[in-house]
Image (cartoon, rainbow, N blue to C red):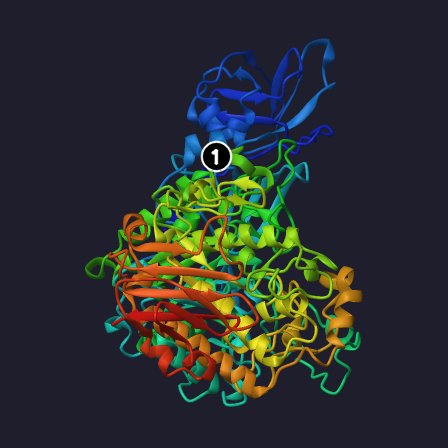
Amino acid sequence: MIRPLAFAAMLLSSVSVAAAETPALDGAKAHWIDKRTVLLPPGGPSVPVLEAGGETIELKEGKAKGLADRYPHLQEYDAYKLPRMSRTRLSELLRGPIYVTTGGPEAQAFATGLQIPGVLDELYANEKPLGVQLKDGVPTLSVWAPTAANVSLRLFADGNEQKVEMRRDHRTGIWSAEGDEDWMGAAYLYEVDVFAPAEGRMVTNLVTDPYSLALTTDSERSLIVDLSDEALTPQGWDDLDKPALEAPEDIVIYELHVRDFSISDETVDEKARGKFAAFTEEDSLGMGHLLKLEEAGLTHIHLLPSFDCATIPEDMSVQVASESFAGLPPASEEPQARSGETRGSDGFNWCYDPYHYTVPEGSYAVDTDGPARTLEFREMVQSLNERGLRVVMDVVYNHTTSSGQAEKSVLDKIVPGYYHRLELDGSVSTSTCCANTATEHAMMERLMIDSLLTWARAYKVDGFRFDLMGHHSRENMMAVKDALQSLTVENDGVDGSKIYIYGEGWNFGEVANNQRFIQATQAEMGKTSGIGSFNDRLRDAVRGGRPFDVGVQHVENQGLANGLYTDPNELRAADERARDEWLAYADLARLGLAGQLTDYQFEGADGEMVRGADVLYFGDPGAGYASDPQEAINYAAAHDNETLYDINAYKLPRDASAETRVRSQVLASSFVLLAQGIPLIHAGQDMLRSKSLDRNSYDSGDWFNILDFSYQTNGWGRGLPPRHENEANWEEQADFLGDERISVDGDDIELTAALTREYIALRKAEPLFRLRSADDVQAKVRFHNTGEEQEIGLIVMSLGEDEAAPELVVLFNTKAEEAEFSLELDSDYQLHPVQQGSESASIRAASFDAGTISAPGLTAVVFKRQ
């Protein structure tokens, strides 16, 4: 209970803010970057003043040191100085309406709001505990709200509601309330009185806790819980043994969506379908598939976002069930039209719309209300770990689903204008699709790191994949790595040195080209960070084209694995342009096979030695970006954009046989699995998975996202994909989907799965495919058939210390027909034992006799020195 004296002190911490109206403001173009410095755009008012709570404070011209480093995007702004003020006075100014206007005769001719994260960081950034903290079973609740006029706790227990005043720490801006043991299990909200610049007035917000550890159904209220409670802990959890992992380069990743994994699997208990619990059912078809992959050498399951997200109804009584559209024509519009009617009310979404970062998603739990989802998530991790598979979480700290006063806004309702990145005019940046967060601000970075540490410690997550990592700073990511790798079994129950971090190092948006900070892009993270970035270079060389091709570009832009120059389709000729493209793609592929290393050297298509950094990627140098193999995530397909099968459906000749489609699919995967670096396989890539040509199935429902572990269907021809993402391509898509030649059967699917496992097994069997340093790669990976006289269609790689007698020789035959290549070496070679037992007769027939390699079309073969 709260003692009377403490209650009185808490009341004194609130402030009364006059309800003065602010003038119409021109955005928020002023920047209050530290206690004494305000920046204004060039050409601003001649006599700027700060208006706060009816008080006018003159700003004097001044200078700001280090702007180019601290705020590079503001370095041309004019600096003004505030008079020296006490911390108490500054606090009063920041807790009410505040803006910059013009003094003197120009009064009110200029009026703009202030962006205040800089001064808030200087005054209030701290490491004090936030959220629910327990001491001897007694909870204390704390929330960082330095600009709030007042914060109260609304407590809900046993049908009763209680309002508890909270006390503000003037040094940290944290509001806290200490409870008693009776509070455990209670629901709560914060009531925050704060000035909302977007509204131009004081508002009172009822809001959940950004540091929530548990939630009621549909995230309506936070819950006071103890994650160490035995009721939330599976038997044996504390003694869980992790699968062995010697080095990051030993990792093989399978990217999987929680719901996709089991929603269509009738061998899973009906209540567990689409849930975390499905991963605990060892006898299901889906788990059987994963266990076969693990036996071959798969090490990590990458789960698409499984934290609390905003767009999936958690109440099963209102969630709309999936509908079957079996029997409709393969290019019918009806499936997408009817499934589109339930978008937002069905159970499907990729979940890239964060609501609460540190709570498992309720729709993936059998019991959606309360902390039971914690137990179910842990049981999933335990089950996968016990079966040899580590677990990666896809995390999305680069944006939130909402901001401002929107219904599902959280952060902005507590500290308006702080947690999100703002444009120069004060509007929220949305280049990521939603409200971009600003992890360059100290307390947003802290929220991210605290959340990750909870997932690592309390849920024993083994790795993290960062969505749009390039929107974070390199400094952010190195802080994340340092925090996670500091964890020890003795102190934290986990070995942080085994936690692997990777992400999308794309360079775009308001932060592009290091405009605001040094970004966590491919180029920057490839400088000895030890953090992986997705390798689009190898992807595009293998598949052809770019992710945002439209219409006939999908067909015209063939790649190495689907016929460029060697097997042209109806819209592409085997002409000089195609030949030049093949040569350029082949060099990109060679660099990818060598780990996309900046300094790796090999003979390029022009006959000259070339460094990875100088290899061209669509006309620009810089294809090589990694300093170490672990910094390259190699892939041919992922959840984004079309599946590999669908890309090949566009690009292969229309009359390509099912056998050719299988070979093309597996060849693309073999480039990924035999490359230095870390391979990632999209779930179903090993099963010819199709999404009926859908280019972005994030909200397309179960029908278009089917993953069939019975191997009866691959998902092709389930109707035109949803209009909202695909209508611009419908004309071409209808033509392809209606073509009966573009189809496969269960035998083709099963063969593809078996062959993919063989390449995973090859990687596991041979450490030379998993080299651990750039020096080793340069010394042991070589390419033949290079330069101006190379034979088009063949990429030949040898691996080993002895150049004259390497341990392994690999030939990637991108031709449709069988090919031979002469290679004189000082040893004898046989087809690798894994491939001697291949499910493919054509692979078993490959040979290396008398210096001549013979390989089937669209196939990679590996030979081992005798």
Q: Tell me: residue 855, above or below residue 485.
A: below
Residue 391 as seen in the image, left or right of residue 341: left
Location of the C terminus by quadrant is bottom left
Pick the front one: 147 or 302 = 302
Please determine whether, in this image, residue 366 is positioned above or below residue 76. Answer: below
Name the residue that disc number 1 marks: 517
Furthest residue in direction front, as rendered: 850
Q: Which of 653 and 96 is in front in this view?
A: 653
Q: Residue lying furthest left in this view?
A: 490
Residue 258 in percent (x, y) is at: 51, 72
Image height check: is 752 above or below 400?
below
Looking at the image, which is closer to me, 591 or 697? 591
- Residue in front for this viewpoint, 356 or 829: 829
Q: Quadrant of the N terminus?
A: bottom left
Dot 1 falls on a residue whose secondary structure is loop
Residue 699 in the image: x percent, y percent?
A: 65, 66
Neighbour tally class for label 1: few under 14, some 14-19, many 20 plus, Cα within 10 Å: many
Let me know if residue 605 appears in the view. Answer: yes
Q: Position of residue 564 (x, y in %)?
A: 61, 61
Residue 147 position (above or below residue 530) = above
User: Which quadrant would residue 619 be assigned to in this image?
Assistant: top right
On the image, which quarter does residue 799 sit in?
bottom left
Which residue shows up at 63% across the image and 60% down it? 558
User: Can see residue 141?
Assistant: no
- Identified at 64% across, 48% down, the residue is 405
Q: Which amino acid does label 1 sit on?
A: Phe
Q: Position of residue 259 (x, y in %)?
A: 54, 74
Residue 511 placement: quadrant = top right
